Amino acid sequence: MNQISVIQTQAIKKTFPGVVALSGIDFTLHTGEIHCIVGENGAGKSTFIKILSGFLRPDSGEIVIGGHTFHHLTPHLSQEQGIQVIYQESLLVPQMSVVENIFVGRELTGKFGFIDRKRALSETRKIIDSLGIDLDPQAMIESLEVADRQFVKIIKALAMNPRVLIMDEPTAMFNAQDTDVVLKLVEDISKRGISVIFISHRLEEVARVGDRVSVFKDGKTVASHENPNRDIDLAMITREMVGRSVDAFYKKVKTSPGETILEVKGLKLEKNSPEVNFSLRRGEILGIAGLVGSGRTEIVEALFGAGKKVQGKIIIKGQEVTINRPADAIRSGIGFITEERQKTGLALGLSVAKNMTVAGLNKFKGFFITPSDETHSAGRYVDDLAIKTPSLQQEVRFLSGGNQQKVVIARWLFRESEILIFDEPTIGIDVNAKAEIYRLMSELAENGAALIMISSEMPELIAMSDRVLVIKHGQVTTELSGKDITEEKIITYAFGVTDDEQTA
Ligand SMILES: Nc1ncnc2c1ncn2[C@@H]1O[C@H](COP(=O)(O)OP(=O)(O)OP(=O)(O)O)[C@@H](O)[C@H]1O
Ligand SMILES: [Mg+2]
């Protein structure tokens, strides 16, 4: 079949100081297709996208768009060619509304040059309706859940009437339901004739929506497969990505739980919210399930002193502790790996080593960390978690998205907290590193730590948890353990059962 290509690149190369990010990307995007790109953390996916958006200039290679050959693009040129990109990092203004974010920088002007708010609002509503999602165009971004923020980014791109829509891990923050909405949306967008480049670490969704799947490895295109029947062989894709087979689902080693280390009693986030009670033993992984927005994150934030709470006792090793700020929590031995990298205060301008050791000050005897202590210990985690960085001194902002997430994890491992909260720990992490993180979590539990894991990925929650608390509307609707931890039960309690049925 003679397919028409919208974008074609040849031998695109890009080097950063000490890092070869791209060593030869050949890539063809055909009209109307959904072309998925997969690859390990640091393989060069985002760098390639930034070259297509004109944000980065390649060292060499060619980009052909609609018959024109370019050696590099600029953001303006790229947009002019109809390319719209939704990046991995959020670029929304939190203190502005949805509609303001969508039209920021290109306000629609009415008569006399005033901003035509009405038109902006009605255009936004039109797109929201056509997508069939539930979103208030006048809501402030900061009040929105992560999933809704992602929808805003998609709407913003669509408002530009693109020919090509590029999405870099659009579903990373999403649970199964929201992911489903996004995937349907992507299919819908492609049916309108827009060509889509879709990057994801979730291979099942790539198999589901991709007309074509290309594999990047070490900055090169190593394979490109058509997927007309949506049945692409994912084991093969994994081998092409990693260079060997990976057992994607590691299961936690069963340990016999030790003493109770944490008790949360009568925790209330607001005056009228339900009480939350749970306990945690050494050696255990307590899973927390629930829809995004169910209050899962708020509960652990309150425990960590990072969110509001009006009452509740927190007892650690039999002693009641006062936790008003994260610093109190850290002192009590609690670590928190949050779902949003940017929010965790990764110091983007500091080195990999500094970012890891900043929470681990007490690990060293004196008050000062000597550079060699730091390097030695940080080096271990760089190896264990396979963090791709040219050196420990590299600034974190130059790391790929997935590798930044690994630094967040390493920081808390470094701190040797006895109680560790993981909020969506494997977001944006490639299959290989995922298995590594599961192994590390299991090892921590075996060594006597107690873990809490919030996750929207059912398979990982089920494989890793000894017990699962299901949260709905801020309330624990059930606690499952052992054989009762099934997807069906979790879903039933997460949203199948209404409040009335529960109390009846
Ligand atoms: N501005 C930069 N300066 C230095 N190195 C960079 C810069 N941008 C990217 N890199 C490096 O280039 C390589 C490719 O990074 P890129 O972000 O393209 O990976 P990725 O495939 O998107 O990974 P992930 O799945 O983690 O998002 C990485 O080793 C990264 O650290
Ligand atoms: Mg990336």
Image (cartoon, rainbow, N blue to C red):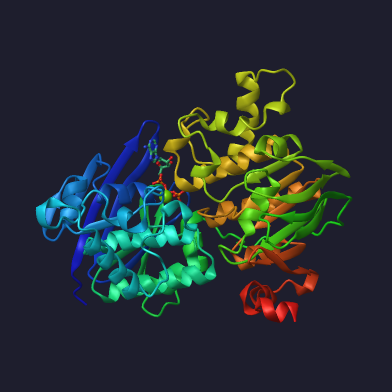
Q: Can residue 420 be seen in this view?
A: yes
Vertical comparison of 244 with 19: above or below: below
Q: Residue 159 location in percent, x, y? A: 25, 62
Q: Quadrant of residue 469?
A: bottom right
Residue drawn at the location 66% of the way across and 74% of the way down: 487
Judging depth in this view, the residue of 431 and 144 nearest the camera is 144
Residue at 48% in and 68% down: 179
In the picture, the quarter occupied by the C terminus is bottom right
Q: Position of residue 321 (x, y in %)?
A: 80, 40
In depth, the one of 423 and 429 nearer the eye is: 423
Of residues 143 and 204, the one drawn nearer to the viewer in this rendering: 143
- Counting the numbered discs, the total is 0
- Residue 325, percent from left and from top: 66, 38
Left or right: where 200 falls relative to 367: left
Q: Which residue is drawn at 38% across and 75% down?
A: 132
Does residue 170 appear in the picture of this structure? no
Question: Where's the N terminus, which quadrant?
Answer: bottom left
Q: Is residue 52 left or right of 17 when viewed as pictured? A: left
Q: Is residue 277 above or below residue 348?
A: below
The picture places residue 5, in percent across and down from the top left corner, at: 20, 66
> Toward which corner of the image does residue 501 lie, by quadrant?
bottom right
